Amino acid sequence: MAVRVELANPGLLLKPSMYAQVELPVSTKGQVLTVPVSAVIDSGTRQIVLVQLAAGRFEPRPVLLGERSNDFVAVREGLKEGELVVTAANFLIDAESNLKAALGSFGSASNSTPALVDTAQAATKKIASVSHRADGVVDSVDAKANAVTLTHGPVASLKWPGMTMEFKLANAALIKDLKPGAKVAIEFVERQPGEWVITAVQTSQGSAK
């Protein structure tokens, strides 16, 4: 959906092709069911959350989403109040093919019988084993591309020297902690060859001079 906004421009401080972040308040009637943004696995064509059916047993559940904030998103269909969901499920998913691969260990999500696993820990450990860490400074943020450019120090797990490079963000909620000049500690993974994705961010006090 395209939105046209007219803004006053005293002093001609706004220039053509400049980027800006705009927040539009929305209102809903009555209470709504929400989940953390990080709980939603979004391939771009469908959205899924992992619902706990019993201790260590989970079901991939398609959902219909509504309004969202930085941290939470409304669920219009697919969940009931009180159901437990995995709240850190989405950080490696950005395409339908990746979604199918990620849900492969849960069985076929398209079957009428719910796809179950005895535990989600195996998948979590596999992901953690390829996670890397680095300290750095934010150079620039591209909200439209959901990406950030960082100058980071050496990464021992990859035998990298310090360098400046672009990272994708695992989900849009991470961008709120990334400002040019901010000192950050990041965790990241290689989603596919040559594509590095930040899965967690911790900001330090102060900013680089």
Image (spheres, rainbow, N blue to C red):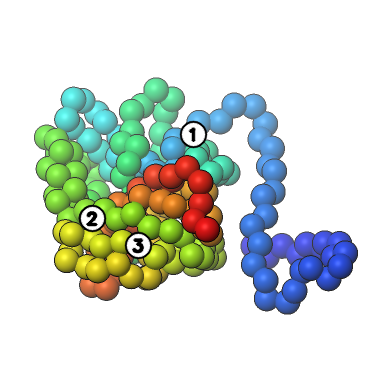
Which numbered tag is attached to residue 152?
Answer: 3
Residue 148, position in %: x, y?
45, 63
Type of amino acid under label 2: His
Question: How busy is the neighbourhood of tag 3: few (under 14 within 10 Å), some, or many (20 plus)?
Answer: many
Whether 89 is drawn above or below 20: the answer is above
Rendered residue at 17%/30% (across/down): 56
For the residues bearing labels 1 and 3, Cβ distance under 8 angstroms: no
Question: How busy is the neighbourhood of tag 1: few (under 14 within 10 Å), some, or many (20 plus)?
Answer: some
Residue 97, position in %: x, y?
27, 65
Rendered residue at 39%/65% (across/down): 151
Q: Is residue 84 left or right of residue 174?
A: left
Task: Compute the Cα span from label 1 to label 3.
Answer: 35 Å
Task: Please tell me whether mark 2 or mark 1 is closer to you in this view.
Answer: 2
Lower position in the chain sequence, tag 2 or tag 3: 2
Lower position in the chain sequence, tag 1 or tag 3: 1
Q: Nearer the viewer, residue 97 or 39?
A: 39
Q: Residue furthest top?
A: 82
Callout 2: SS: strand
Task: Please tell me whether mark 1 or mark 3 is closer to you in this view.
Answer: 3
Q: Is residue 201 left or right of residue 60?
A: right
Which numbered tag is attached to residue 34?
Answer: 1
Rendered residue at 14%/51% (across/down): 129
**Residue tagged by mark 2?**
132
Type of amino acid under label 3: His
Question: How busy is the neighbourhood of tag 2: few (under 14 within 10 Å), some, or many (20 plus)?
Answer: some
Q: Nearer the viewer, residue 168 or 27?
A: 168
Residue 168, position in %: x, y?
39, 63
Whether 171 is drawn above or below 51: the answer is below
